[in-house]
Amino acid sequence: MALIVQKYGGTSVGSAERIKNVAKRVAKARAEGHDVVVVVSAMSGETNRLVALAHEMQDIPDPRELDVVLSTGEQVTIGLLAMALKNIGVPAKSYTGWQVAVKTDNAHTKARIEEIDDAAMRADLKEGKVVIVAGFQGINEKGDISTLGRGGSDTSAVALAAALKADECQIYTDVDGVYTTDPRVVPEARRLETVTFEEMLELASLGSKVLQIRSVEFAGKYKVRLRVLSSLQEGGDGTLITFEEDNNMERAAVSGIAFDKNQARINVRGVPDKPGIAYQILGAVANANIEVDMIIQNVGAEGTTDFSFTVPRGDYKPTLELLNQLKDSIGAAEIDGDDTVCKVSIVGLGMRSHVGVASKMFRTLAEEGINIQMISTSEIKVSVLIDEKYMELATRILHKAFELDQ
Ligand code: ADP
Ligand code: ASP
Ligand code: MG
């Protein structure tokens, strides 16, 4: 007998019929003798609907009230799933985030989980109940409802699995595992039987939304056994996130490709080339709580230099406004940018033992006439910034060039 945390995403609980199906899956795991804690998302489309409603009330919705609204989606599905389970004779009890309590910091709409009280859940499990917890939400030290950022139910599930020391955390979604790239974009993408924790961390942070990045970080920190599976099809082992590194010299150079449209490029041209200039520009951006990702600095003409960097697309206009205010004090000749760019990244532990991986990526893109605007690399990934109109093409040709379809 094991303790299993199962998480069902929006599509998996997208209709009454699907919720009944989830109940059957949960009942099956319980019939096999397992203790089950279920985490659910809101029905698909619901969180987007709530975000849109909030924006009809205020251009920039009040963060505390926005979390009050956003958290309602998951409250509906926990109650419905509990009813569906009771209806087939399985004792179950639903919990909102604050009832558990899932304690978070005070950052509304992107709160981090700090502590989980497992006493009530353990007592229910002991009585043979299935425990159902609302994903994506918690309570902060002021007693206010918080939410964990889009896709945050994954993180709720992994954090609960860590707190309960569960034997496995199973993420049920609308694909049957982690693929070499998003199968909606590249139909030839293949399911990976296993992916290492390090690779999954890169893929998630570079745009693969199959797992929220914080859920992967949690799994790494607390060594949670994490598996991604399909809720829509029977059977299958899905993809297991592994911690042990096989020393397989035959390992392919690239394991997966991620892409991300949530990017914008900012250019600050013709600033004096002197110590402290990077700090003046990027420090101001950081102080405005805007996350800078890729950065390049070019030597310009006559003692000047040009900076380019990327920010999340939603921060494009605020960043331009901020820098235009500083234009005179930093001595910039010109400030402009582009918010129609995207980042495409290849990821693989195999890069450590293969040479020429990056150049193969650049050659493949060049052969299709795709211009690279920025590059960033780490030991196990290479990312390029390109025009967003080439995102799908670039992903497809790289997938083929690195033989991920085979
Ligand atoms: P859920 O609502 O269950 O949380 P998400 O939509 O958040 O589901 O995540 C699943 C989706 O992630 C898939 O439908 C797929 O389009 C997308 N995806 C992106 N990259 C990958 C990948 N490498 N492997 C599998 N799915 C991916
Ligand atoms: N319902 C939330 C969202 O759509 C959380 C989640 O689904 O994981 O982002
Ligand atoms: Mg998700």
Image (spheres, rainbow, N blue to C red):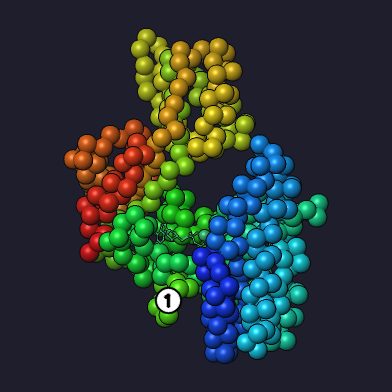
- x and y percentages locating residue 349 in the rendered image: 35, 57
- x and y percentages locating residue 175 in the rendered image: 42, 67
Q: Residues within 10 Å of mark 1 (few under 14, many from 20)?
A: few
Where residue 378 sits, quadrant-wise, is top left
Tally of numbered discs:
1
Q: Which residue is drawn at 23% across and 54% down?
A: 400
Q: In this view, does 230 lie to the left or right of 67?
A: left
The quarter of the rendered structure image containing the N terminus is bottom right
Residue found farthest to the right: 142
Q: Which residue is drawn at 60% across and 58% down?
A: 46
Q: Quadrant of ligand 1?
A: bottom left
Q: In terms of depth relative to the viewer, which is nearer, 323 or 341? A: 341
The answer to whether the beta carbon of the residue marked 1 is less than 8 Å from any atom of ligand 1 is no
Q: In this view, does 249 lie to the left or right of 125?
A: left
Q: Mark 1 points at which residue?
A: 233
- x and y percentages locating residue 123 in the rendered image: 75, 80
As displayed, is residue 24 above or below residue 314?
below
Q: Does dot 1 land on a helix, a strand or a loop?
A: loop
The quarter of the rendered structure image containing the C terminus is bottom left
Q: Which residue is drawn at 39% across and 48% down?
A: 259
